[in-house]
Amino acid sequence: MTTIRDIARALGITPSTVSRALSGNPRVKEETRRAVEKTAREMGYERNVVAANLRKGRSMIVGIVIPRIHREFFSNCIGGAESVLNQAGYSALICQTIESVEAEIQALKTLKNYRVAGVLLSHAINAPNGDHVKEILGNTPLIQFDRVFPDLPGAKIVGANCDGAYKATRHLIEAGYRKIGTLAGYMTSQAYVERLVGYRMALEDAGLPFDEKLVYYNTIARETGYEAGLKAIGAGCDALYSAGAFSALGAIDALKEKGIRVPEDFGLMTPSLSTLNQHPFEMGEAAAHAFLEGRRDTQVIPMELIERQSSNKNKT
Amino acid sequence: MTTIRDIARALGITPSTVSRALSGNPRVKEETRRAVEKTAREMGYERNVVAANLRKGRSMIVGIVIPRIHREFFSNCIGGAESVLNQAGYSALICQTIESVEAEIQALKTLKNYRVAGVLLSHAINAPNGDHVKEILGNTPLIQFDRVFPDLPGAKIVGANCDGAYKATRHLIEAGYRKIGTLAGYMTSQAYVERLVGYRMALEDAGLPFDEKLVYYNTIARETGYEAGLKAIGAGCDALYSAGAFSALGAIDALKEKGIRVPEDFGLMTPSLSTLNQHPFEMGEAAAHAFLEGRRDTQVIPMELIERQSSNKNKT
DNA sequence: GCGATTTATGCAAACGTTTGTATCTTTGCA
DNA sequence: TGCAAAGATACAAACGTTTGCATAAATCGC
């Protein structure tokens, strides 16, 4: 591979001038620059970014850490982030944690070792707090999205969880359901706490009682959703607002097993399965923009309700 | 940040010994190694992989180039590939091409500049051939998946396209449909050619005529699928096998507009939308394994038919 | 107990850039 | 014409590793 040394030798100048010429430094004559660019092209020169990064102490790589790449929500986030970063000349190094804090720590260390320019992070669900992040990342810029710890520094991008849950629950109420339970998710995650608040507000605004017994906590996987679904049926619910998408699948399993029809006998609302558009692509874009612009604020991405059969009791 | 120099100074030895101790070189005394590891831990040493990569001339990064990250198929591929690569100590640098050859070229150049250890690639749909890849990548190991050019060197992972199309088409025939057209995609892509073959074979094996007029080429986007759908209706089709997922969405639009019910009046089979499981996650895993093991062969991932309402004319 | 072999460490040169400082050349102005 | 300022390039030292070769120390065979 040809290096700037080779180009310098070929032109009878020094590597420093070649470097400056190629990086657009104004301290080189226009004539020299053109000559350098020409020779570089002719010799098939490709800049070694590894060497450049070493010298500069930072890279044009941004790390993205997410629980699972192939979850629709996160793949959209990455898609949005990558396209924005790519525009700005950055590349994206992706690490998935499979919802494990240990893997998250490992991923952050790897990224730190690569001296990434910044990290876009959505936490593993069982991460207790952001201490591990602070310790590992040091002063590497951090942008959190979707699953965030408010006390960590740097920009945060979150969905309008409370609002979304409110809209979804109100939709169930307007569709005629009256005893609405919720698959609430983990209260360690801010996002789920907010959704529970939204759910409760919708009930209270409609004059319906908020019943702690109909709140099924720690439901996030399909299995726990299934169990909670059975309990909700047993408790006489006629609808469920599920704060997570996978638990909703479990609830559907339970309903099917009991021969309960959706939406005729039972209403179901869930943030994914396309009933509540969380705009994940835009969230990823926003995270990337936040990094590029050095933002440190919190942005809230709106959630949009999509009316669907599975929750329309009135209109068949 | 502490370097191996700092550790060496602290222990009164040289950086070379520290380097060897940390990288498991057998040429250091066990005692020394332990001392080095201890001091490294105490001083919070983190290896600078950028420097190591520069010296070694290669990195532990594998580039993954795909058309769109947030397409379900590709996000699953990446998910599978990343988890396997991560296990082996590699990280994944992701580039999406948005189906543009120019972006693909740019992505490959970037990866080459990062001196990646290898590239997993699925081509942009309008890539005419693999010449650009050969030229840019040189001797960087290349693994192609899903959309491959047979004449490029290195391992290839493809779906059983012909078989999948055959199964899907036969399913339509068995469900009672008789005039089955196809949204065939681009014939520049090997995958689509094979699917067309499978479609044709299924018809002929069932004693049904293969009618070139019912083959709608260059359908891949929703819009072109819509137009082809209208033509198919006009031509009297009672079913369609769509080689692509997005064109099928367009066809559904066309059917809805005409008030034609699926599956009562019209059958529809498509590789995604979960009617034909292409095992993308496994494909990604296979690609990563192929890289790690230095394979150069072609692997075929089977396709599995998932029976669904939208193509069951008999059983409502 | 001595030379030969093995084992452990040190030395120093890379890897390909970038960049602060110094040097040389040109230009501008009086 | 001379001197200062600006403009262009050169010099050389980093960035933090890795690694071939040399050297020193320890072990072994006889």
Image (spheres, coloured by chain):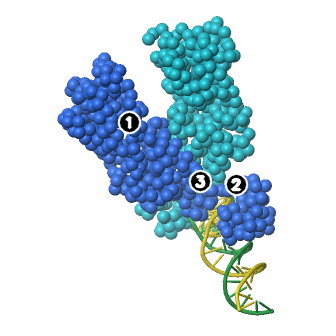
Chain colours: A cyan, B blue, C green, D yellow
Q: Secondary structure at mark 1?
A: strand
Q: Report the mark closest to the observer, 3 or 2.
A: 3
Q: Secondary structure at mark 2?
A: loop
**Location of residue D26 (image quadrant):** bottom right
> Please, what is the three-letter code of the amino acid marked with disc 1?
Leu
Q: Are marks 3 and 2 in contact (CB under 8 Å)?
A: no
> Please, what is the three-letter code of the amino acid marked with disc 2?
Glu
**Location of residue A303 (image quadrant):** top right
Circle 3 chain = B
Q: Residue at horizontal 52%, vertical 63%?
A: A4
Within-10-Å neighbours for mark 2: few <14, some 14–19, many 20+: some
**Location of residue A139 (image quadrant):** top right
Q: Which mark is residue B89?
A: 3
Q: Report the mark closest to the observer, 1 or 3.
A: 1
- Between A288 and B159, the one lying in front of the other is B159
Reading the image, the residue beneath label 2 is B46
Between the residue at mark 2 and the residue at mark 1, the CA separation in whole angstroms equals 49 Å
Tag 3 or tag 1, which sits nearer the N-term?
A: 3
Is residue A56 shown to the viewer in this render? yes
Tag 2 or tag 3, which sits nearer the N-term?
A: 2
